Image (spheres, rainbow, N blue to C red):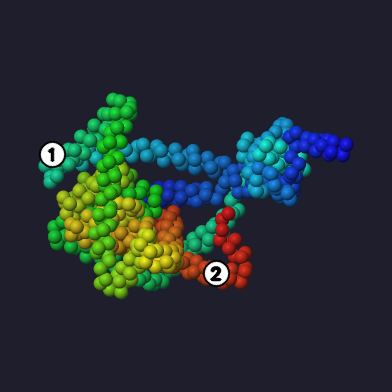
Amino acid sequence: MKSMLVGLLILFSQTPGVLKTGNPPGNLQAVDTPNDRGESITLKWVLPEDISGIEGYQIFREAEEESLHLAGYAPAGKTEYIDELGVKNNVGYRYQIRSISPEGLVSPFSEPSPMVKAYPQWFKKNLTNSLVMIIIYLGLILYFVQAAKRGKKIFLRRVPGLDALDEAVGRATEMGKPVLYVPGIWPMSEVATIAAMNILKPVAKKVAQYDSRIIVPNIYPIVMNVAQQTVKEAFTEVGKQDSYKEDDIFYLAYEQFAFAAGVNGLMVREKPATNLFLGAFFAESLLLAETGNMTGAIQIAGTDRVPQLPFFVAACDYCIMGEELYAASAYLSADPRLVSSIKAQDWGKMAIVISLALGSALTIFGLWFIISWFTTG
Amino acid sequence: MRRTLPLVIAFGIGFAMLIQYFIPHPISENFYNVIVQQWFIIIFAFQFVLALRSFFMHHIRKISQKKEGYWFSAVAIASALFMAIAGFATKRGPFFDSLYKYMYAPLQATMFSLLAFFIASAAFRAFRARNLQATLLLVTATIVMIGRVPIGDYLWKGMPDLVEWIMTVPNMAAMRGIRIGVGLGAIATAMKIMLGIERSYMGGE
């Protein structure tokens, strides 16, 4: 009789479809997802005490014009879910959640969340630190530009690679050979390519002054167009517009290695006395620099791509590293307004060094809050 | 006007792109995804007109003047035309795909594989112990190369850990230093262009 009663108890306690091993997650919170375009709601919950036999959590949603229905699923152990499926802005939603076992048994529903609405935001609050830093940095640049206008002298250390440009162009003239200028393999929208164009101007001016020849092969037609205008302007400024040859600044190939093969062929055939590789370079950097080295040209390379720097250091006579590429235009033109911006860069670096030292010191003493100032999550 | 208009455009677009980065609103997203991206696509399509003109003019001139290696130019023109005709005639069918697969891809791979030889010759030059820095480079590179292969572990158990330390501490510190400089330099250059301080890119001082 006793065993029959126990059997009946077990039978009734295992009502089909109801998970008895786990409770639903608790304290379900639903909030509008921050820093987004709207149409998204973030759910957070607290895991039930007994999580054995739980495969995941089913998320149910109801709205003013939607009955309660399954809206999403989160695997076991998760405590957050972002609902983006069919969520509309300015519509009130309420959520409920329940646990599910691998066999499909489910727990009762959690308490419903408070009503929540999704809204698009006008500012990414998580990027406030970036914005503040940009404003401070902009302020520094403007301050030093104004200081330069007032006649304040700014010291600029020597950059051997840039000092050697004069010598390199002179050598090409003496040898009666052209100067090869490769402005990288990235489009005009990249800062490194813009920097390459900024350096092209003074180089082309020197080439024009020495009555030499400059060859500029390009991978992007728009870069080619800008290069043509820049070289033409440089030649015109020194009164050598008749020496300008548009055909020397040309489009070579659109693919990376086709371009590299084309430039290598050019180096072998034309044997330029000076090769200048300035801009954004990738795997082709060593192909170009080694071929140039074999032809005996004096080579000056500059890039902001850190992985390519060792190749240029190994194969070129001078290497302009990272930010020196951006500073080159200011360095060569000696325009006080441009030079002054380099001073602002130094101050920016100083601020980062101080932050690193301060942050390291504070985290050693367990003050982790400083890390949150520098994250954008 | 010839100078002012490009400066105004550079400032306006630069400022809009900067603001857009901080605004998640759909208006801002649409500005970037629809207007800016479509603008890019239109410019991208038109730039090929410039490319074709430059490509053919450059190579035809070389052939007509019989410059050194002019027959390379003939090969370049013939290849370009052949690919274009094959693409149009077969509507980018299997034959066109085969040209890519069996001609273009191997040519690219050949160029890329040349890197192995160039690395060897560049390393041979770079690793000559001419001064203190070159000697440091030589020693460090030797340790890293040995530590990355099984023989390093065989020679000394601590070798892989030493290599890991070299890569994650001194090497990483140097790389981050350069990258911080690059980041600040890129922002400064962008701001100089936006504010019209840097004008070399449009032919001005």
Camera-nearest residue between A330 and A260: A260
Instruction: Check if mark 1's residue and mark 2's residue have beta carbons within 8 Å.
Output: no
Above or below, comparing residue A233 to residue B108 in the picture:
below
- Residue sitting at x 76%, y 41%: A20
On whether disc 1 and disc 2 are found on a single subunit, the reply is no
The residue furthest right is A1
Which residue corresponds to mark 2? A360
The mark closer to the camera, 1 or 2, is 2
Q: Quadrant of the C terminus of chain A?
A: bottom right
Query: What residue is rendered at 65% in x and 42% in y?
Result: A55
Query: Front-most of A126 and A110?
Result: A110
Where is residue A371 drawn, in percent x and y?
58, 63
Residue B185 point in image, percent of width and height = 42, 60
Instruction: Say whether residue A271 is visible.
Output: yes
Marker count (numbered): 2
Residue B173 can be seen in this image: no
In depth, the one of A140 and A219 nearer the eye is: A219
Residue that badge 1 annotates: B64
